[in-house]
Amino acid sequence: MLCVLCERSSMLEIDGSEHSGSGTIVRDAIPFCILTGQEIHLWNIRAKRDKPGLRPQHLKALEAAAGLCDGKLEGGTVGSREIRFRPGKTIKGGTFAWDIGTAGSTAMLALSLLPLGLFADGPSTYRMTGGLFQDFAPSLLHLKHVLLPTLRKTGIQAEVRIIQPGYVPKGGGRIELQIAPAKEALRPLELVKQGRVQSIRGIALSSHLKERDVSRRMGRECERALKQKGFRAEIEFLHDEKESPAFERPSIQPGAALAVWAETDAGSLIGADMAGARGRTAEFIGKQTAQDFLADLSSGAAVDRHLADQVIPFAALAKGTTTVRIPSVTDHVEARLWLVEKILGVKWRIHENLVTIEGIGL
């Protein structure tokens, strides 16, 4: 599918230290440039992070995007703080596989490539290897049970399958993302009213930790914390062991993750999650996940803190006006709004945590 909105003779200049100064700018900018046919010069990459420059997960997102459109990437090395990219004309459908090589987030890689799959010349299957559950990155459980169901409201047809869990520090997790090309412009989102909670579900997953009862301890603590506030949650306990893997293959190392999500009568999905880490007890994970969930719920928002910025790229590409009430305006929200305006020419406004985005109808 040809996906060029316009051809611009001058190269787009993006300072990666703006706003969040994070990898989000890298992961969003390249797909947007592919979809609009713009060349880009991006510098000061991840300038506000402890380890500036491209990390393996960011580099893999750039290489994957370049491969899908036969684009040209310059400066694509780990640690690089400056790149230049020239997009190709067509986004290829088909089956592709990428290995981050570390515990870097496969969820972030998937979210970077999803917009490209929507405008590919055929159905796409993306197989990715790396980390599935870690701090400072969206959980695969949240992606599967909260984000993708929310994006289906726009007309997006995409499914993710967890093949093998993967944790810090070894990674080795495997996922598969299947995407159908969009048949028409994406529909805008209307997520303003939170509504009343109808159900709360969740998954407590642990790998090679059954003897310590980690899944049950995380889940029960979360259920207790929610019950104290008048909510009943149904959390599934998954024990991923060599003899009885929770998915197709067992994790290559011990690890844990918890995710909960609510569905409301207004059609909102609000979730929270946390990954295990050295020195972090199962009870802490359960309690903190419940607290994060309750905080977003009590804000009156129609999305959670993760969805608040994750839906922005898709709202920008949609035809019409998206309106979303978010829990708070974070650095990531500001960065993504700035970027869709900078690259796509999208108009937006925020008033009392109500975000309005005028999509371009790609």
Image: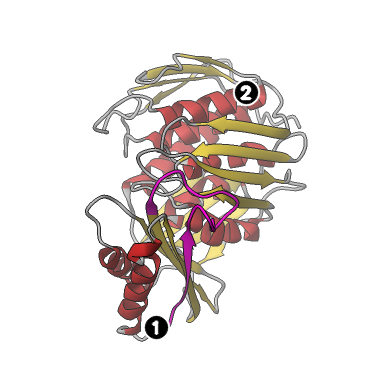
What's the magenta region?
232-255
Question: Which quarter of the figure has residue 295?
Answer: bottom left
Pinpoint residue 20: horizontal percent, then vertical percent.
32, 39
- Identity of the amino acid at label 2? Gly
Q: Choose between 287 and 165: the one closer to the eye.
A: 165
Asked if residue 240 is among those painted magenta in the image, a careful observer would answer: yes
**Residue assigned mark 2:** 67
Q: Is residue 97 left or right of residue 352?
A: right
Q: Is residue 1 magenta?
A: no
Q: Position of residue 324 (x, y in %)?
A: 48, 61
Q: Secondary structure at mark 1?
A: loop
Q: How many marks?
A: 2
Look at the numbered disc 2 and give the secondary structure of its residue. helix
Residue type marked 1 = Phe
Q: Residue at x 63, y 36 (%)?
A: 116
Residue 109's place in the image compared with 261, above or below, is above
Percent from the top left, x then y, of residue 177? 63, 45
